[in-house]
Amino acid sequence: MSTTTEQSGPTASTIPALADELESLRERIATLESSLERKEARLDHFEAELERERATNERLEARVEELEATRTPIEARLDAHEKKLNANKDRIGELQGRELEKGAHLLEENVDEREIDVADGRLERISKDDDRQYFRLPESDDPLERGGDVTLAHGDCLPIQQLARMDEDLLRTTTSSLPSRLAAKLWQARVDPNVGDNPWENGSAGVREYVTASEMKHWIRRQESGVSDEYAKKLVSRTIDALLALSKSRLAVRKKSQRKNGLEYTERRVLLMEDAEIPGGTLTSEDT
């Protein structure tokens, strides 16, 4: 007769394993509880931050509504001011136009020539003895004789004198030709001591002033950064052509033989002769 041994519980060998598993589960539960607490704390933080943002948004929305409520009156006031300014500008332009038609000479700085309505739409810019610029109708004399005598009218200037009076932006707008702009700057350097970079030299024997092709080349490279020596040589020829054309041949070009370092060479010179008829007189400040 066989007998069987029934085991109703864990054996001695499995008890330690179960104890370890239980301890591991406890640690896992503790870790999960700690993680859950941290997540709940973060959630509370985010909810509090969200509440602050909502409050901020509500304040901003209220401010926007307030600004929108005041914008209409402000815009209305700005429109009214703009209309008033435009009306005043029109009145001033009309008054200036009437004064010009009566022969007045008005300071250039006080006149917006685009807003002036005069006969034939013609205004003339002139210089006076006080070294200031004025506007007038062509050939009209100022009955009040302000500013002294007229020294040079814009319409009487040579093209090169007209270009030389312009600032850099207006010069670029007026002509896209680099040689023409260089010619204008070169002329201005001759007559305006404030320019500072003047390659012209005093002449003799009937020559008032002159500039050599070599000095012109160096001057061009100083004016136009990045220009190579070879390209500057080409610009010299083109600038000389522009000088002759824009001065209406008041300037002349001559070749002169010179010796340097024992070698003889021929160089072109641009000459302003003593007897050249330059509008504004013969002084070096005639077209400033």
Image: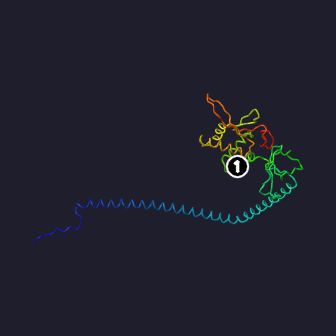
Task: Say few, some or many: other residues with alpha carbon within 10 Å of mark 1 (under 14 / 14 to 19 / 20 or more).
Answer: some
Give the position of the C terminus as an image quadrant: top right
Q: Is residue 126 above or below residue 59?
A: above
Q: Is residue 85 above or below residue 151?
A: below
Q: Residue furthest bottom?
A: 1
At x 71%, y 47%, the residue is 167
Q: Is residue 19 left or right of residue 245?
A: left
Task: Indicate the position of residue 223 as horizontal and vertical percent values.
Answer: 65, 42
Q: Nearer the viewer, residue 195 or 62?
A: 195
Q: Residue furthest left?
A: 1
> In the rendered view, how is the structure colored?
rainbow
- Amino acid type at mark 1: Leu
Q: Is residue 193 above or below residue 83?
A: above
Q: Is residue 97 left or right of residue 233?
A: right
Q: Is residue 116 left or right of residue 7?
A: right
Give the position of the N terminus as an image quadrant: bottom left
Q: Nearer the viewer, residue 96 or 178?
A: 178
Q: Mark 1 = which residue?
A: 171
Instruction: Give the mark count.
Output: 1
Q: Nearer the viewer, residue 199 or 48?
A: 199
Q: Nearer the viewer, residue 280 or 125?
A: 280
Task: Indicate the position of residue 30 as horizontal and vertical percent values.
Answer: 38, 60
Task: Indicate the position of residue 36 as horizontal and vertical percent values.
Answer: 43, 62
Question: Considering the numbered disc 1 on the image, is that residue within a helix, a strand or a loop?
Answer: helix
At x 78%, y 60%, the residue is 86
At x 80%, y 60%, the residue is 90
Task: Indicate the position of residue 269 as horizontal and vertical percent values.
Answer: 69, 37
